Amino acid sequence: LKYEASNSGKTHLMLHILKHKQEYFQTDPAKTIVVLCNNRVDGSAYEEQGDADVITLQDFDVEVHLRPEIVLIFEDVQFLTEKITDCINIYAHHFNLAAVFVVVQGILGSDDLFRLLSLTHRLILFYSSSVCTRLSQYLNSHFFQDQDLKAYIRATRHYSESRKNILLLELNQIQGKNKTRFLAISGLGNIACGEKMTPPPVYYPHLSEKKNYRDKFGDNEADVDVDDEDGEDEFPDDTYVLVPAKNVRKHRKIGSGGVNSEDERAQIWNNMVKEIEIDIESSLPAKKWQVAKNIMRSILKSKLFSVSTDGKVLMIKGKPKSSLPFLDYIIAAVRQSGPNEIGDPLNVQITKLLLSRNTPTIFFKNKSLLRDAAGGLRKLLKKNKKD
């Protein structure tokens, strides 16, 4: 389902996809059938592509025009007909079509077209238009129920919207051999074989597939050209970019030779941070990831603590008996406190040290931990003032 306002570039994207079919489809499509659903739409741009037949909806005949591995495009759909819904629900599978695209300009204001959200598998949104922002906000509020998934999809929208990207979002997961491991692709129109992809498309794995992505692609790295004039991090955390395979290299292993001690220390540090972030994301809901990572960074920046190289153990520097699981402290700091709860003494001590180094109190959601630590910090400051 391709949704956009008029003059948003829908034809340009379709022509780009058809030009680079080998990159967008699992098999090389045999032909393209474009069905014009609005008599004011001109299909000449598709005809110039070379391998596309352009017909009207009235002349479209399933038995005559459809065969395996065809790309079927319903252009500028005004209302749903039995032909269109049958192609989506039945013939796409029955004829083993390469893809069915349904191009529309309005959904929220049409009860008829609104049904497409339940019929189609994926939605393509053009964030150069505000109508797509409104639709994605509606979907996030009413279509998806899981809170972690809602937060994740909201992040894809913010990234795409800020860069006016074309976003592909999976609404209803495909089953069988065509099932994908990703939820969304931001920058869908930037995929091109043998050409410079700037900026490269950003892939968002399904939440259930994040570990598989890390295991399979976590050691891959590549140099990419980005436009970072806004000063922001170009790519969101825990996403993946698509680049030509020839540009990809593996991380060099520590101790493999040719890596100086400074590089080794930096790699150990980066691996440790990544392990802590993985623990956070696998143990906490998405809405708590940011505050948990803020506390993690405050600890790692401070010279008052020691952390094991695998990121599992936290200790107050010089006090071996103060060691505890790093994740245990993070979870204690970001959870809500119970009525009349008294904070664990060790957690209180760590929090007190963090507050003494001006860590913002807003990071801590456990009010009992924050209260006990702040009280202990005031006593310490009074004692130091007397001394």
Image: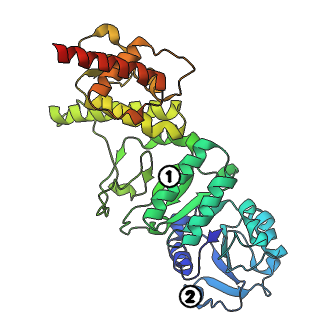
Q: Is mark 1 on a helix, strand or loop?
A: helix
Residue 18, picture quadrant: bottom right
Out of 376 and 219, give the one closest to the viewer. Answer: 376
Q: Where is residue 331 in the image (x, y as percent from the top left)?
A: 48, 26
Q: Where is residue 316 in the image (x, y as percent from the top left)?
A: 29, 16
Q: Which amino acid does label 2 sit on?
A: Ala
Is there any visible trace of residue 287 in the rendered image?
yes
**Label 1 belongs to which residue?**
155
Using a 10 Å C-alpha cutoff, classify the residue at mark 1 as few (fewer than 14 neighbours), some (14 to 19) or many (20 or more): some
Out of 276 and 304, give the one closest to the viewer. Answer: 304
Q: Looking at the image, is 138 positioned above or below residue 361? A: below
Taking the image as shown, residue 118 lies to the left or right of residue 353, namely: right
Q: How far apart are marks 2 and 1 (CA)?
A: 35 Å
Q: Where is residue 253 in the image (x, y as percent from the top left)?
A: 28, 34
Q: Earlier in the sequence, mark 2 or mark 1?
A: 2
Q: Looking at the image, is 294 positioned above or below residue 134? A: above
**Label 2 belongs to which residue?**
45
Q: What residue type is labelled 1?
A: Ala
